[in-house]
Amino acid sequence: MQQGQRRSFLVYRFVPLVCVPVLAGCVSEQSMLHPAGEDAAAIANLFWVMAAGTVVIWLIVMGITVYAVLGKKRPKTERFADRFILVGGVAFPTITLAALLIFGLALLPDWVRSHRPDLRVHITAEQYWWRVAYEMPDGSLINTANELHLPASQTAEFVLTSTDVIHSFWIPNLGGKMDVIPGRTNLWRLKPTDTGVYRGVCAEFCGPSHALMAFPVVVHEPAGFETWLAGEAADVEEREGHALFVSAGCGACHAVRGTSADGAIGPDLTHFAGRRTMAAGTLPITADGLQSWLIDPSHHKPDVRMPAYASLEATERDALIAYLLDLK
Amino acid sequence: MKRLAPFLASAAAGALLLLAIPLTGLLDHAVHSAGKGVVNWYNQLAARQSIALRSAMIAVPDLDDPKMVLRGAGHFQLVCAACHGSPEAPPAQLARDLSPAPPQLTSWRPDARLFQTVKYGIRHTAMPAWPTDMRDDEVWDMVAFLRRLPTMDAETYAMLAHGGAEPGSCASCHGQDGEGRGGAFPRLDIQSPQYLADALLAFRDGSRPSGTMMSAARQLTDEEIAEFADLYGHTASLPPPDGSDLGRTIALEGIVSRDVPACEKCHGPIARTDFPRLSGQSADYLRRQLHLFQKYGAERGGQHADIMAKVIEDALEEGPHRLEPEAIEALADYYGH
């Protein structure tokens, strides 16, 4: 019994505790070391240059240390000592840090945004999800949530704001992070280079479910992106299950464009079933996932605003789930 | 340390002796013997002083509202009159067998002490505490009634406590057709039978705390609940509400910046019939329920309490409030009557 408990502690707590941070580095969908955007490539470049430089400097320092401890104890001249301190303690750090500063400053984004971006996306961070709206050429906005689609090799500008607390918008594979601050608008640009599916996260602690505020980022070929956006912009028609969706009050918070459900409080659900995850990267979109979510959202996501719908009849919940899974 | 030892030893012995007293069986458990003499006097004095001390800091709200008196009267008739008697009838036989005997409430008592007594009860007597500590509003209703009781004649009492209906029936408080007797009690006639049955079940099992309704629903059987729900419930909706502009805005559009959805989406004509209807409901009732959800969230109870909790519960009781006091007032004014 005792031994079993100890083993289970080892297996379920300790091993993951040690392995997770190590293995996390191997996942490529949320990794700065697998750049798929211009900024990310520059950042990764900086990282490798610094890592290599650091290793060289570390080896030199260690070598000198070992020499000082084990080497022949022959007195050095005062002149040598002065020079050594001047070169190793003043000149070398100054030159190295200055070089690093120049290298780093050169990486800063181009502050003069002369050219228009190819795409503008309005992003509003809320505890604990992302409101996403694509600006169309005519200025109108196409609302969606918790998933970002971008065209490759085009510059996307993000208009970032928050409705509650400070969040931070970060897609490690595409570039650096930018704080999302209530009451002000931050602009941020990213230029993806490689198609693929990546993962964006909130990078500023924002409450109990901060770690459950992620979003898939899908980078398409430009033509594929246009197709996707056209599909996303299309309304859906009222279909079976709509009456239940509205009478149960879902429409008070969620919008399904093209129907009478026009709530503006929670995520837009127009093309819900076409997304890769629900509840901001928390659960996969499956009947089981939805069932569990509707019965007790707070279990999956502490402090979430979504109420529990455990009080609905099981058959009604099933019908709602069928309706949601049909919102392609 | 050594010099302290004798003192410590005797203190320990004294503590042990105190513990041993109940073990000896010398303390009398009997009601009748304690009902007379020194022990009784001792307990009563302690209770009186305890109530006086603890009521000193209680802020008394305005108690002149006739609706409060009406609500207090209905519960008094249902629960209190059996022991304390009423202007209409003397206490029931069982009350005369109690010792100490429940007092006839014919003399004036300070409001705060009435509140303290009704809310917390009195130890060593048959006076119970209020069934829930979430509903001070109900206790104040009772106080509003009790302060009128000493000078009340039987006729006034009968009108207040049951208004001609059979004492203790649903109609004695909620009115002949469940119309709420002029806004004093929540209307039943605007709700669906399903909603009424859900509410009664929640009151009966205590998951929706209310001193008055838990007492009223406690002895109902499932059949009676279904019968009453069918008797009073209707699904016909009232004409659309009319009232303050702020109330209308919140009801129809919500307060999006505070994640408060539009009330109408769940309480309007399109909503499920087991969600309560608000239009025409007692304004007092609406105000109180909003305060309860705001303060206690899902603990307020009821079939769909979690939804309302997520809609208006505050993270901190002292605010910031998702529904400001003005907003609650405006909503009660818009929907209520």
Image (cartoon, coloured by chain):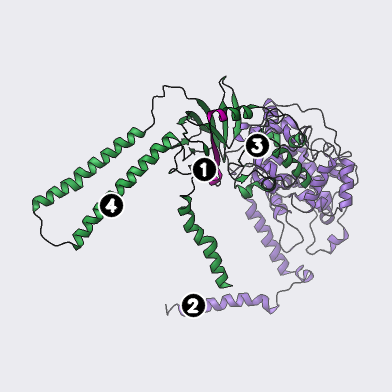
Chain colours: A green, B purple
Label located before the other in sequence (4 or 1): 4
Q: Residue at x 33, y 34 (%)?
A: A105
Q: Amino acid at mark 4?
A: Trp
Chain at numbered mark 4 = A
Is A324 displayed left or right of B225 in the figure? left
Instruction: Note whether residue B160 is visible.
Output: no
- The residue tagged 1 is A206
Kindly report the distance in space between the C-alpha atoms of the residues bearing marks 2 and 3. Answer: 77 Å
Q: Residues within 10 Å of mark 2 (few under 14, many from 20)?
A: few
Q: Secondary structure at mark 4?
A: helix
Chain at numbered mark 1 = A
Q: Amino acid at mark 3?
A: Phe
Kindly report the distance in space between the C-alpha atoms of the residues bearing marks 4 and 1. Answer: 37 Å
- The residue tagged 2 is B7
Q: Which residues are magenta?
A: A204-225
Q: Amino acid at mark 1?
A: Cys
Q: Amino acid at mark 2?
A: Phe
Query: Are tags 2 and 4 found on a single chain?
Result: no
Q: Residues within 10 Å of mark 3 (few under 14, many from 20)?
A: many
Kindly report the distance in space between the C-alpha atoms of the residues bearing marks 4 and 3. Answer: 52 Å
- The residue tagged 3 is A272
> Of discs 2 and 3, which sits in the foreground?
3
Chain at numbered mark 2 = B
**Residue closer to the observer: A128 or B265:** A128
- The residue tagged 4 is A58
> Of discs 2 and 1, which sits in the foreground?
1
Kindly report the distance in space between the C-alpha atoms of the residues bearing marks 2 and 4. Answer: 69 Å
Is mark 2 in CB contact (under 8 Å) with mark 3? no
